[in-house]
Image (tube, rainbow, N blue to C red):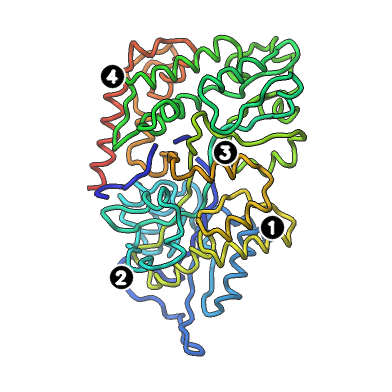
């Protein structure tokens, strides 16, 4: 794994991470741990935590309760929440690092950014032989390495894909799509259920199609055609994906973009999410982080069916341990307790049960007891099906591929779309092609070259 070793073949960024940080971490290498003491044969250690998941002290949310549970289990380790790390997250971390105050453990918005800034501790020796680390699925474990070193840890796991309103299809005497559906079956499901005059639409939005379509059409491609460090945007798979998305839009099978205000007047809701919650969207693209609000607001029989082809699109969040931490073992112990470790995950289930909460962050571990306990509490069969196919999964790319954000969205193409957009970005040009405003075939060669240039620049920045 010379550069970021990546699984990568997956869609669409969300969202649970925990970090902790040393009370006196110093990037210059000075030992500022003057508050650490030795009691009952164990050194008392203070770690700071930098995460956007903790809410307020008054909220005392699940994450804060887990911190308390950790300190009760390991009384020689004190966890302090570092409130100085805030949005913009990367800028805040950079400021802390330059002042020698980088947290011991912190959330990572993008692994390449953390690598380029040399914030990350080499965990290779610490994780070697650790049963919890060994239980992480191989597809996830691959992205934790850089230059054969373990430089990040997974803190959250979600899947991206479609939810289906099974009651709506039953009501229309149609077969509801299932996990593993083909692209043609997906297309039929979107088209057949749409009935605009009666306020029913097949799909919520079309823009995710171009990311998953290549991976569904070709097992050797990942999200956005990514494979082995490059994208193949001039491929038949990508062009077909854009044209398919455009056909969904041009034939009014999707709520966002396609429908006029007069057409939307037939629907009971102000946006696609509200229309879904009213039971009138056939297939809704979202992440598994949404199962909480769906369970509360979507009062009909729904399930998760992923993307066509049955390849699981995996979205991970990540945490890093500071390169300058004085307590890497304790920082690792805390991190895995809050994320992928068996002891901590079982405790998380216990605390959530006591609170009457349901976890929407999927297990990162492949430990069977963890899986049995988690899925006994989650009545969404399609998510278990997706988990069973994770070894054939594809990774969502923004947090793990250097240069990807420019290659997918931000790089300017030099193409004028209109008076308001004289120099369209890659993302704007692709969206315009989905809406039918331009023909992607006219630009795809230069877009492919530009995207791969940005990927190469991102990779070069890590050398």
Comparing marks 3 and 4, which lies closer to the viewer? 3
Instruction: Identify whether 434 is placed above or below 305.
Output: above
- Per the model, the C-alpha gap separating discs 3 and 4 is 32 Å
Which is nearer the eye, 417 or 128?
A: 128
The residue positioned 47% from the left and 35% from the top of the image is 11
Comes first in the chain, label 3 or label 4: 3
- Marks 1 and 3, how far apart at CA: 25 Å
Q: Nearer the viewer, residue 31 or 115?
A: 115
Q: Is residue 60 above or below residue 206?
A: below
Residue 455 in the image, given as x and y percentages of width and height: 29, 35
In space, the residues marked 1 and 4 are separated at their CA atoms by 51 Å
Discs 3, 2 touching: Cβ within 8 Å: no
Is disc 1 surrounded by few (<14), some (14 to 19) or many (20+) residues within 10 Å?
A: few
Q: Residues within 10 Å of mark 2 (few under 14, many from 20)?
A: few
Left or right of residue 193: residue 428: left
The residue wearing badge 1 is 59
Q: In the drawing, what numbered circle is on residue 287? A: 3
For the residue labelled by badge 4, is the local secondary structure a helix, a strand or a loop? helix
| Other residues around mark 3 within 10 Å, as few (<14) / some (14–19) / many (≥20) | many
For label 2, the residue is 29
The mark nearer the N terminus, 2 or 1, is 2
Element assignment for label 1:
loop
Residue 446: mark in rendering: 4
Label whose residue precedes the other's in the sequence (1 or 4): 1
Q: Disc 3 to disc 2, how far (Cα)?
A: 41 Å
Vertical placement of residue 361 versus 166, above or below: below
Residue drawn at point x = 62 percent, y = 36 percent: 304
Q: Is residue 395 left or right of residue 368?
A: left
Q: Position of residue 443 (x, y in %)?
A: 33, 14
């Amino acid at each position: 794994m010379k550069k970021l070793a990546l699984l990568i073949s997956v869609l669409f960024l969300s969202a649970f991470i925990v970090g902790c940080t040393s009370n006196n971490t110093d990037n210059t290498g000075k030992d500022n741990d003057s508050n650490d003491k030795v009691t009952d044969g164990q050194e008392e250690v203070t770690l700071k935590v930098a995460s956007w998941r903790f809410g307020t002290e008054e909220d005392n949310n699940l994450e804060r309760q887990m911190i308390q549970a950790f300190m009760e289990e390991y009384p020689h380790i004190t966890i302090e929440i570092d409130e100085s790390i805030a949005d913009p997250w990367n800028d805040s971390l950079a400021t802390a690092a330059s002042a020698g105050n980088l947290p011991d453990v912190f959330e990572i918005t993008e692994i390449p950014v953390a690598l380029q800034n040399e914030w990350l501790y080499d965990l290779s020796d610490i994780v070697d032989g650790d049963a919890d680390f060994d239980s992480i699925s191989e597809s996830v474990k691959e992205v934790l390495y850089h230059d054969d070193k373990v430089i990040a840890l997974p803190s959250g796991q979600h899947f991206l894909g479609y939810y289906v309103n099974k009651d709506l299809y039953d009501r229309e005497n149609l077969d509801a799509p299932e996990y593993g559906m083909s692209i043609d079956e997906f297309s039929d499901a979107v088209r057949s259920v749409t009935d605009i005059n009666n306020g029913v639409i097949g799909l919520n939005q079309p823009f995710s199609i171009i990311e998953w379509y290549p991976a569904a059409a070709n097992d050797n491609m990942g999200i956005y055609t990514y494979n082995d460090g490059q994208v193949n945007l001039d491929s038949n798979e990508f062009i077909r994906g854009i044209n398919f998305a455009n056909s969904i839009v041009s034939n009014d099978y999707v709520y966002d973009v396609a429908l006029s205000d007069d057409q939307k007047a037939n629907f009971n809701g102000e946006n696609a999410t509200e229309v879904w919650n009213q039971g009138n969207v056939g297939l809704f693209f979202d992440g598994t982080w949404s199962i909480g609000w769906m369970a509360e607001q979507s009062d009909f029989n729904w399930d998760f069916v992923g993307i066509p082809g049955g390849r699981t699109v995996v979205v991970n969040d990540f945490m890093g341990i500071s390169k300058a931490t004085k307590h890497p073992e304790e920082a690792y112990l805390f991190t895995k307790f809050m994320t992928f470790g068996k002891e901590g995950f079982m405790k998380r289930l216990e605390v959530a049960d006591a609170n009457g909460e349901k976890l929407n962050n999927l297990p990162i571990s492949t430990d069977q007891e963890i899986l049995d306990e988690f899925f006994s509490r989650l009545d969404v069969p399609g998510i278990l099906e997706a988990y069973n196919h994770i070894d054939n999964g594809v990774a969502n790319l923004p947090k793990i591929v250097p240069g990807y954000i420019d290659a997918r969205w931000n790089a300017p193409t030099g193409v004028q779309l209109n008076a308001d957009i004289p120099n369209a970005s890659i993302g704007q040009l692709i969206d315009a092609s989905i809406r039918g405003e331009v023909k992607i075939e006219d630009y795809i060669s230069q877009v492919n070259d530009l995207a791969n240039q940005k990927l190469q620049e991102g990779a070069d920045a890590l050398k």
